[in-house]
Image (spheres, grey):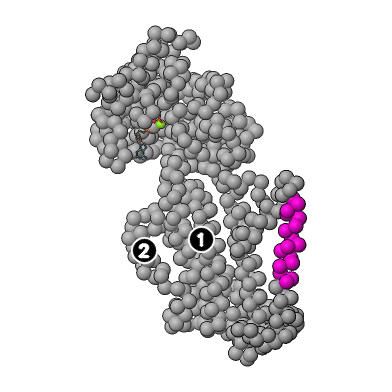
């Protein structure tokens, strides 16, 4: 299971004739951890949907490992921004879903799902329905479900948005642990600049004109204040740029 | 009607503030009292042979009806009729449930099925199922099949319409999630669409059960040779009014029981819905 490379070439993405971003160029190396930040509504989720194969580009190309993305594939797991658990399945049965799709035998499926739930700190919540879980717990079940699919690329849309600082730190560590065991390409959308600086090997600031800025970010335990300022400035820039135009 | 009663029952049982409980304790006597009063009024009017604008002089009183009911309960005929009607309802309704869900899902999810079946459904739907009696007699070699057919048609449309609506109202994120996990068309159908539409489908099934009873009873009255509808009409033609009322009560009870069953199964199958917390 080698990590995938992902690439958007002059891609125009949009809904029903209305383009959200045009001529987007972005390449993600195999095994890279790319953090994506940008103002709300600038098209971060849209970009992930395109990489996942849920949204075909209206122009240009979106490619995985050099081949055009024709549709969704279990190679590219998407952790959705909004609640995407099946509400009639218990937490465990939700995590079992990708295993069932891969025809893993029933008892292996169950053991695997329980192991993943334990890793996200929900060993006791396996039998509960999504509506009986808190928002942050549901996010963690969704993470477990995506990881159980053993994808070659992980597309994550603000996966830790609803977590408290401690659980969030634990999940960030878990994610890096899992990636050390089973390398995968990650595109990680977040609103939290510190999270982007902590996790990303490269940070991309997305704006209405596509990639506004790319900031290489050699991961380090202490975040570099200068780089933090750079990301924040880039995040502030699109608004002023738009007003001038 | 069933729904409203059940809701109130839940409220009455739910532990609440003392004032609520006091009011709840008062409710049962009030309810029982209203039924007793209605029966008493019926008894008084019929015993006095009242001829107001409506005429009670030939109308059977509650005692006559109770006596007739007791007599019928001791005959095998009564149970045969009930069994016959229930079998007709059950087969027509089961057919309508299975085909209704299948057609509803197909029409909502496939452009082809929609173009192929949509116009036909829209043409046939406005015809009340009971108006199909002559057609059913013409089409089916046996009376029995005709009655089941009419019951089926009656329940079919509410199920199709509610299923189609439920499929269209499904949030796309569930299907997207299953597809990004590698699920194909069949998996999406089995793991997302069918479970996801159940709440809507059960709405259609409840409506369908009500219409199915109307149609089975009317069809039996018109062309039956057995069944509670037939027996009720039979009693009318021989001027046996207590028999008519026994038939009416039987039909009411059967309708109530069958919609209760649909309701119960529906609630069991959709426990995952928000707001179902703590309900049995
Ligand atoms: N299903 C849809 N149909 C039509 N327009 C959509 C749809 N989803 C998103 N959009 C539009 O596309 C634009 C980008 O949306 P997107 O969800 O990608 O933003 P985002 O960067 O993820 O924002 P946020 O940070 O708030 O999640 C928005 O202007 C939004 O209105
Ligand atoms: Mg988003």
Please give the name of the residue rendered at 68% of the width and 85% of the height, measured from the top-left corner. B50
Q: Is residue B248 left or right of residue A241?
A: right
* Residue B177 drawn at (x, y percent): 45, 39
Is residue B233 among the parts visible in the rendering?
yes
Q: Is residue B49 left or right of residue A188?
A: right
* Residue B255 drawn at (x, y percent): 61, 69
* Residue A192 drawn at (x, y percent): 45, 21
Q: Is residue B10 above or below residue B130?
A: above
Element on which disc 2 rests: helix
Please tell me which of labels 2 and 1 falls first in the chain: 2
Q: Quadrant of the N terminus of chain B?
A: bottom right
* Residue indicated by mark 2: B117
**Chain part drawn in magenta:** B21-37
Does the magenta-highlighted stretch encompass residue B181? no
* Residue indicated by mark 1: B204
Please give the name of the residue rendered at 34% of the width and 55% of the height, measured from the top-left corner. B111
Please give the name of the residue rendered at 47% of the width and 80% of the height, measured from the top-left corner. B133
Q: Residues within 10 Å of mark 2 (few under 14, many from 20)?
A: some
Chain ID at mark 1: B
Does the magenta-highlighted stretch encompass residue B33? yes
Chain ID at mark 2: B
Ligand 1 within 8 angstroms of badge 2 C-beta: no
């Amino acid at each position: 299971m080698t990590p995938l490379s992902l690439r958007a070439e002059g891609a125009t993405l949009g809904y029903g004739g209305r383009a959200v971003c045009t001529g987007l160029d972005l390449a993600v190396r195999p095994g890279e951890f790319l953090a994506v930040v940008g103002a709300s509504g600038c098209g971060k989720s849209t970009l992930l949907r395109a990489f996942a194969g849920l949204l075909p580009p209206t122009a240009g190309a979106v490619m995985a490992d050099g081949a055009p993305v024709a549709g969704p594939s279990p190679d590219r797991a998407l952790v959705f921004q909004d609640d995407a658990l099946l509400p009639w399945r218990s937490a465990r049965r939700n995590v079992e879903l990708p295993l069932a799709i891969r025809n893993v035998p029933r008892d292996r499926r169950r053991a695997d799902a329980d192991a993943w739930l334990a890793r996200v700190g929900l060993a006791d919540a396996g039998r509960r329905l999504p509506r009986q879980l808190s928002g942050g717990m549901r996010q963690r079940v969704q993470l477990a479900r995506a990881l159980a699919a053993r994808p070659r690329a992980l597309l994550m849309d603000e996966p830790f948005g609803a977590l408290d600082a401690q659980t969030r730190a634990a999940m960030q560590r878990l994610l890096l642990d899992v990636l050390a065991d089973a390398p995968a390409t990650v595109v990680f959308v977040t609103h939290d600049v510190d999270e982007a600086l902590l996790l990303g090997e490269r940070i991309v600031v997305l704006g209405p004109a596509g990639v506004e800025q790319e900031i290489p970010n050699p991961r380090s335990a202490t975040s570099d204040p200068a780089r933090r300022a750079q990301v924040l400035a880039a995040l502030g820039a699109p608004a002023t740029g738009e007003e001038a135009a | 009607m069933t729904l409203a009663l059940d809701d109130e029952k839940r409220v009455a049982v739910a532990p609440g503030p003392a004032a609520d409980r006091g009011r709840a304790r008062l409710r049962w006597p009030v309810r029982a009292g209203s039924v007793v009063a209605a029966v008493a009024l019926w008894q008084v009017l019929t015993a006095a042979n009242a001829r107001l604008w409506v005429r009670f002089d030939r109308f059977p009183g509650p005692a006559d009806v109770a006596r007739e009911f007791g007599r019928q309960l001791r005959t095998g005929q009564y149970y045969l009729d009930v069994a016959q009607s229930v079998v007709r309802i059950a087969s027509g309704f089961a057919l309508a449930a299975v085909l209704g869900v299948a057609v509803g899902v197909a029409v909502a999810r496939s452009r082809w099925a929609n173009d192929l079946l949509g116009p036909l459904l829209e043409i046939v739907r406005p015809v009340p199922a009971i108006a199909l009696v002559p057609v059913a007699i013409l089409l089916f070699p046996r009376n029995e099949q005709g009655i089941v057919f009419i019951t089926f048609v009656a329940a079919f449309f509410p199920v199709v319409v509610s299923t189609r609506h439920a499929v269209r109202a499904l949030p796309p994120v569930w299907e997207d999630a299953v597809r990004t996990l590698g699920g194909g068309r069949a998996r999406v159908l089995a793991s997302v669409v069918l479970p996801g539409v159940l709440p809507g489908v059960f709405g259609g099934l409840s409506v369908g059960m009500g219409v199915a009873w109307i149609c089975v009873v009317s069809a039996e009255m018109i062309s039956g040779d057995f069944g509670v509808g037939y027996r009720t009409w039979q009693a009318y033609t021989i001027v046996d009014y207590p028999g008519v009322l026994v038939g009416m009560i039987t039909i009411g009870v059967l309708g109530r029981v069958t919609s209760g069953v649909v309701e119960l199964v529906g609630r069991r199958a959709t426990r995952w819905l928000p707001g179902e917390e703590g309900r049995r």
